[in-house]
Image (tube, helix red, strand yellow):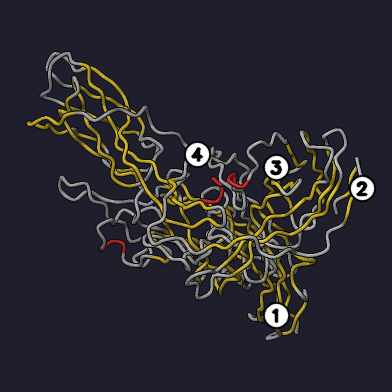
Amino acid sequence: MTLQLRSKKLGTILVAAVTAVLFLGSAAVSSAQGSATAPTSTTAPTSTTVPSSANPATTVLQSPAIPGVSPLPGPVVGPAQPSENMGILDVTPDQGVAGTPITISGSQLAPNAKVELTWSTADATWQVQTEPDTVNYLGRSDTLLTVALATTTTDASGSFKLSLKAPVDWGGVHDIYAVVNGTEVAHGGFITLRTVTVSPTSGPVGTPITITYSGLGPTFYTGGASLLYDNHYVGELMANWTRGTAQVTIRAAGSVGKHVIQIGNAISYLYLNVPQSPIPYTNGAKLIFTVTQDKVAPGPSIDWPVNVAPTVSARTTLDASGLAVTSNVDATLASTSGPVDTKVALSATGLSSSAPVSLVWSTVVGNRVDCASTCWIFASTPLGSAAPAGGSLQSTITVPDGLGGWHVVQLMQSGQLVAQVPFYVKESVVGQGVSSLFLKEGQSFTIHLEGVGWTQLDNTVGVDYDNSYIGYGCGFNSNGDVLLHLNATGGPGVHLIDMYPMLYSLSPSFANTPYGMVPVLTYAKDYPGLALGYQMPAIRLAITIVK
């Protein structure tokens, strides 16, 4: 099903108003070259850390190479000088979805002149603060751009007419200028409208439903959306790195019959009177999904985000300042990510053969509750020791059962840190995920996760029960181990639990950090952690209530 969200022109001003049909609400270490000693305990903390200042250093993230994202509609061009006698471009139609055929006409311009038509657009991204002991979420930013859309030439009377298709770009108002010899001589505009697709439109409980919402804008008030399922809040959508197209997958929940999916403009929560706002073209839609049967509970699954190369090299617990200046040791791990208890081969060269090597896992301990001064500290967990031979070492480490996220394996020799290698600990489900697959109405149960992190990007998971957001779990104080306590409700049948990444915007908290503390449904392609190598998944479980 595809819905096109319409607007209309009021006079000569490009202002959109949605139609009633579609508007919502009006519509051990083992050594191959020497002996090894198994780890015994966790050492004392090595240093302390305090929360970041109120004015943290900001890293504006470069978007990773997200697959399937439309490029800029044309090459970026520099600013042009506006004419004192600005003409008017006729753009017909002056609004429509991306790909709509449009005609741009101009008159009373210089005869036989080359005309460059420009199109206003933008880039949008996330902002963070990276530190050796954490990553803080600092919101979003956008940058206005102008691109060359097309070129043409006026005729002897100074007129031109050009037909093309509306670019695939952000939704909202786009300025179009006719530029002659570096001067903007005429101005028009086009409003890119929003569309919504859903697939499939029917299926049994647990059916994955893909919803695509296109035409989101690049700005604070136009760049977010909210999803409801039978008037229950599911979570937030963003499209910073996908240039206005937000795509999410939820699962069909509820009794057999029709269910209403509602999507629309939002800053975390749905904006319910969009037509009365300064941005009336940011409308949404109502969709219907029909649950056909409620018989078999789907098995547990984990949906991972896209696998992209990070654009930021900083890693938590990785600090080059402690590395021995004279070290020429090169260390590598056979894999750079995995869940707790993963066994990973470690290789190192350039070591001295006269002293054993201690292998250490660098992590932190602490929490974010009522954080006012010292809230967490660096800590080291011994992974074992081994004696290198011929300057080389081949060993196997076991990833500790602890916090998720980025950690460092450190090689210590003669009291010096001679090498360190990052490793990313992924979230994982313990056993079948839930304490019981079959329960009575009102019976309590638990969900067990491991490898939850501590930064503001991976500290929490947002929990939906039958597509209704009910709360979150935090893994910092419990060292990555999260035991969620829920109650079985909703009557006999299959009930779904979906856990999504969250942006933790508290303790410390910063200004202008929208979208915090709610499930991020667009985690797969538009989540700041992707630029730092974080792989934050959706974890999907189910229970069955029996009579």
Dot 1 amino acid type: Pro
Cα gap from disc 2 to disc 4, whole angstroms: 52 Å
Cα gap from disc 3 to disc 2, whole angstroms: 20 Å
Dot 3 amino acid type: Ala
Cα gap from disc 3 to disc 4, whole angstroms: 38 Å
Whether label 4 touches label 1, CB < 8 Å: no
> Foreground mark, 1 or 2?
2
* Residue that numbered label 2 is attached to: 35
Cα gap from disc 1 to disc 2, whole angstroms: 58 Å
> Foreground mark, 4 or 1?
4
> Foreground mark, 2 or 4?
2
* Residue that numbered label 4 is attached to: 69
Asked if residue 405 lies left or right of residue 392, the reply is: left
For residue 79, what is the image quadrant? top left
Sequence-wise first label, 1 or 2: 2
Whether label 3 touches label 4, CB < 8 Å: no
| Residue 319, percent from left and from top | 59, 48
Sequence-wise first label, 4 or 1: 4
Helix, strand or loop at mark 4: loop
Cα gap from disc 4 to disc 1, whole angstroms: 42 Å
Task: Check the picture and name the quadrant holding the C terminus.
Answer: bottom right
Whether label 2 touches label 4, CB < 8 Å: no
Whether label 1 touches label 2, CB < 8 Å: no
Name the residue at 36% across, 46% down: 142
* Residue that numbered label 3 is attached to: 419
Dot 2 amino acid type: Ser
Helix, strand or loop at mark 2: loop
Asked if residue 182 lies left or right of residue 450, the reply is: left
* Residue that numbered label 1 is attached to: 492
Sequence-wise first label, 3 or 2: 2
Q: Is residue 1 visible?
A: no
